Image (cartoon, helix red, strand yellow):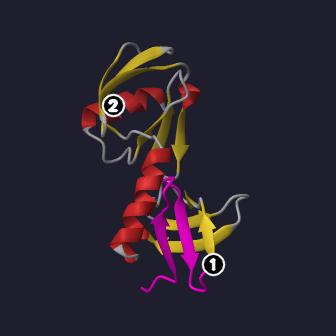
Amino acid sequence: MTTTFQLRRDSFGKLVLTSAEGEEHVGVIPVRAFPIQAPTRGISLVREGGKEVAWIDDLAEVPEQIRALVQEEIDGREFIPEILHIKDVSSFATPCTWFVETDRGDTEFVLKVDEDIRRVGEASLLVSDSHGINFLVRDMWRIDKHSRKILDRFL
């Protein structure tokens, strides 16, 4: 796939998109259409005011330099640790403390109410802690048996 635009950082660290026609857009921001179900597909590059200036069907199909810049920008703005294993919970009644292993290390958080666990799509869950931080369970059917047992008590 050929890309019809170029992407670079300016001296202030902002992303600069140069269109095929040579028009420059400073400070573009990548926005994922489906951040949980398809995080690398359907990425819009928008300028100030939210106007789309470019579209990426699949991040895997763009040149490495563009892919790295887009992923770096997304990683700097989004913080959704993925729960890999639920070690324990302090209680099966809320509020309770969850002890989990995430893709960013071990942590614990307080689940205030059962409703802070939300289904996203068919298999994914978003778990919001008492501070509003979202944790992702990418596929509740593929998580280990112990973690699944705990999840079942709250769903």
Does 93 appear above or below 7? above
Q: Residue at the far front: name it.
A: 11
Residue at (55% x, 70% y) in the render:
17
Q: Is residue 14 magenta?
A: yes
Amino acid type, mark 1: Glu
Residue 131, numbered circle:
none
Quarter of the image that includes the N terminus: bottom left
Residue bearing mark 1 = 23
Q: Which residues are magenta?
A: 1-23
Query: How many numbered marks are there?
Result: 2
Residue at disc 1, secondary structure: loop
Q: Position of residue 132 (x, y in %)?
A: 55, 28
In front of the other: 98 or 41? 41
Amino acid type, mark 2: Lys
* 55 with respect to 145 (left or right): right
Q: Position of residue 139 (x, y in %)?
A: 38, 48
Residue at disc 2, secondary structure: helix
| Residue 92 in sight in this render | no
Residue at (69% x, 58% y) in the render:
48
Mark whose residue sits in front, 1 or 2: 1
Residue bearing mark 2 = 149
N-terminal label among 1 and 2? 1
Does 58 appear above or below 74? below
